[in-house]
Amino acid sequence: EVQLLESGGGLVQPGGSLRLSCAASGFTFSIYAMTWVRQAPEKGLEWVSAISVSGGPTYHADSVKGRFIISRDDSKNMLYLQMNSLGVEDTAVYFCAKDLRGYDAFDMWGQGTKVTVSS
Amino acid sequence: DIQLTQSPSFLSASVGDRVTISCRASQGISSYLAWYQQKPGKAPKLLIYAASTLQTGVPSRFSGSGSGTEFTLTISSLQPEDFATYYCQQMNRYPLTFGPGTKVDI
């Protein structure tokens, strides 16, 4: 079964760090670019970060640039998002998503992992 | 950054209605636009990419059109399972951006 499964969310204090993981299965992970998208409570979708196939570039939204790092381990079919210097504005459900090959659209999504930044 | 606006932000409709949602880009994005459907508590679902290409498995009552700065998502005959929020997304350049969403309600 083709699947993306996020983990690593939780409650963290402002200024803290968290590492999200996304386990991919059912497809050839290494040949697809991958993305993180988040959704704050009762808000719309916000693109966060993207990573090309291994050795390629990474991209981050201005709102997270310098604080978040996206990475991947193709040997483990894993996608990661290291989040540092977290603020209350980072509170959201974080989705990992698979890029549609040849397009920066997302044809497969995980169920999401919730991150709450609060003291 | 490329900004996307959607109209309307909220739409009240009935089963069987023809529904049209608009998405406008702040600058030309050719046909690099996708549409998603999201239901409460669920992940988004890709409906259309490249402005008018129907994603595999998506019912043919969904269609997309437009290029440049003006785009449209049309549902030809609204079904009960179509009540959801719809987002457009530009894939022309980074940072990728989403529109604010259009909620389709009864």
Image: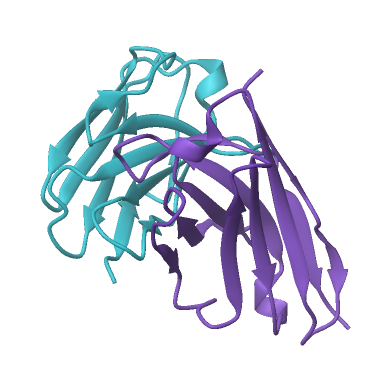
Q: Quadrant of residue A92?
A: bottom right
Q: Is residue B91 left or right of residue A11?
A: left
Q: Position of residue A89 (x, y in %)?
A: 65, 77
Q: Is residue B25 left or right of residue A23?
A: left
Q: Position of residue B26 (x, y in %)?
A: 20, 65
Q: Quadrant of residue A94?
A: bottom right
Q: Quadrant of residue A105?
A: top left
When the figure is inspected, residue A104 is found, relative to residue A119, above or below; the finding is: above
When the figure is inspected, residue A41 is found, relative to residue B45, above or below; the finding is: below
When the figure is inspected, residue A12 is found, relative to residue B105, above or below; the finding is: below
Q: Residue at x 31, y 40 (%)?
A: A103
Q: How is the image coloured?
A: by chain
The colour with which the image depicts chain B is: cyan
Q: Residue at x 29, y 28 (%)?
A: B74
Q: Position of residue B97 (x, y in %)?
A: 38, 59
Q: Position of residue B16 (x, y in %)?
A: 41, 13
Q: Residue at x 71, y 80 (%)?
A: A86
Q: Residue B25 versus residue A29: which sits nearer the camera?
A: A29
Quadrant occupied by the N terminus of chain A = top right
Q: Residue B77 versus residue A12: which sits nearer the camera?
A: A12
Quadrant occupied by the C terminus of chain A = bottom right
Q: Residue at x 22, y 45 (%)?
A: B32
Disc count in the image? 0
The colour with which the image depicts chain A is: purple
When the figure is inspected, residue A55 is found, relative to residue B43, above or below; the finding is: below
Q: Residue B41 versus residue A87: which sits nearer the camera?
A: A87
Q: Is residue B104 visible?
A: no
Q: Is residue B4 visible?
A: yes
